[in-house]
Image (spheres, helix red, strand yellow):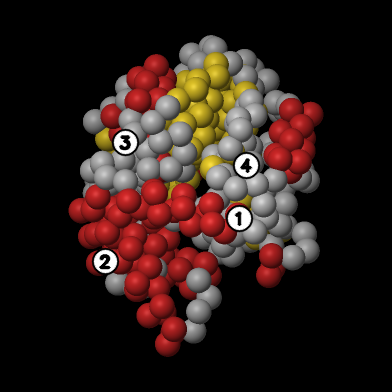
Amino acid sequence: MKPIPMVDVRDGGPVAYARARTAAATELRDACVPLPMWSHGVLKPIDKIAADYLRRSGSPYRKELERVVDILGFPGAMTLNMSYLFACTAATEPDVSGAPSIRRSLDWPFHGLGKCVEIARQAGPAGEFYNVTWPGAVGVLTAMAPGRFCASINQAPMQRRTASTLGFAYDFAVNLKNALAREGDWPPDHLLRYVFEHAPDFASAVEILSREPLARPALFAIAGAEPGETALIERTERDARIYRGAVVVANDWQEPHAGWQARMNRENNVARIAKMRECGPSDQLFDWVQFPVLNRLTRLVVEMSAIGEGRLAARGYECALFSGEPQRATLDFHLHEAA
């Protein structure tokens, strides 16, 4: 196991990050997309589709991502940045001391994400934040801004127009086509980065995450720096539902809605939520990381709170060939030891 590195890119952001960690980004790409070198050209058409979508989106980070792709210089850099294909479990609740906090796991069917995870120390007009991320990434999936808030994204359920198993591929294709065709909408991870850069407090972050149009549905878990500041924001492309207080979320709506199907199936979602609630806050780091919250697709687990100078702990996981038992791939990262 190796330590999770922290890279200071407060000056230069993801572009400086890509320059500093090009070799690490290449290692990540080779782990996530283990194709022989001669076949990497198959990624170029997918990169073009992702780039065309980005140009139509509402993201202010388009030019920056294009620069990152140029710096990395390999097929797949754009595609990996614009993918939104993960499942997760998260709890927003007070920790044992009463401070608002988030416990989150990230499940993603890409080998290498666990061992290649890093912490990017970034900054925006509203202040600094710590982004649990990967070299070459431009958006934010999990981050903590000391004295302001911490937040994470879970994949939302899938919209279904058919009820059959055979219709799943059709619904998936229609959802993807609709997302790629939207103009002026935010990629969810780009919106969350914008919030960390520009929102001065919990209330402002909740307002922005609830208001802006999204290209895909998303679930935002957020915890502030004052007692009682915890919320889950369930987003479709245009609408938002806000649940205040302690909430546990997997990859389904808190309340059933016709025409939507939970990611990883409903039974799996119910089981992950039940385990997270059963474990509850604890003085023991990551003692909630148990089956089924921990599973063969788990790549990352994080505990964080924005109170005071902030608290952030992270651990990577891998599972050989997506079979067997998930194994720790990194030493535990503790912000207070790394800062």
**Pointer 2 or 3: first along the chain:** 2
Labels 1 and 2 touching (C-beta < 8 A): no
Q: Residues within 10 Å of mark 4 (few under 14, many from 20)?
A: many
**Pointer 1 or 3: first along the chain:** 1
The residue where tag 1 is placed is: 167
The residue where tag 3 is placed is: 194
Residue 212 position within the rendered picture, expressed as x and y whole percent measured from the top left: 33, 30
Q: Is residue 315 left or right of residue 4?
A: right
Mark 4 against mark 1, which lies toward the viewer?
Answer: 1
Q: Nearer the viewer, residue 142 or 264?
A: 264
Residue 67: tell me if it is visible.
yes
Labels 1 and 3 touching (C-beta < 8 A): no
Looking at the rendered structure, the kind of residue marked 4 is Gln
Residue 314: tell me if it is visible.
no
| Label 1 to label 3: alpha-carbon separation | 36 Å
| Label 2 to label 4: alpha-carbon separation | 39 Å
Looking at the rendered structure, the kind of residue marked 2 is Ile
The residue where tag 2 is placed is: 71
Residue 293 position within the rendered picture, expressed as x and y whole percent measured from the top left: 71, 43
Mark 2 against mark 4, which lies toward the viewer?
Answer: 4
- Would you identify the image quadrant in which residue 18 lies? bottom left
Q: Is residue 321 left or right of residue 227?
A: right
Q: Residues within 10 Å of mark 1 (few under 14, many from 20)?
A: few
Labels 4 and 3 touching (C-beta < 8 A): no
Residue 174 position within the rendered picture, expressed as x and y whole percent measured from the top left: 46, 53
Vertical placement of 148 versus 20: above or below?
above
Mark 2 against mark 3, which lies toward the viewer?
Answer: 3
Q: Residue at x 67, y 52 (%)?
A: 164
The residue where tag 4 is placed is: 261
**Pointer 1 or 2: first along the chain:** 2
Query: How many numbered badges does the structure rendering display?
Result: 4
Q: Is residue 307 left or right of residue 46?
A: right
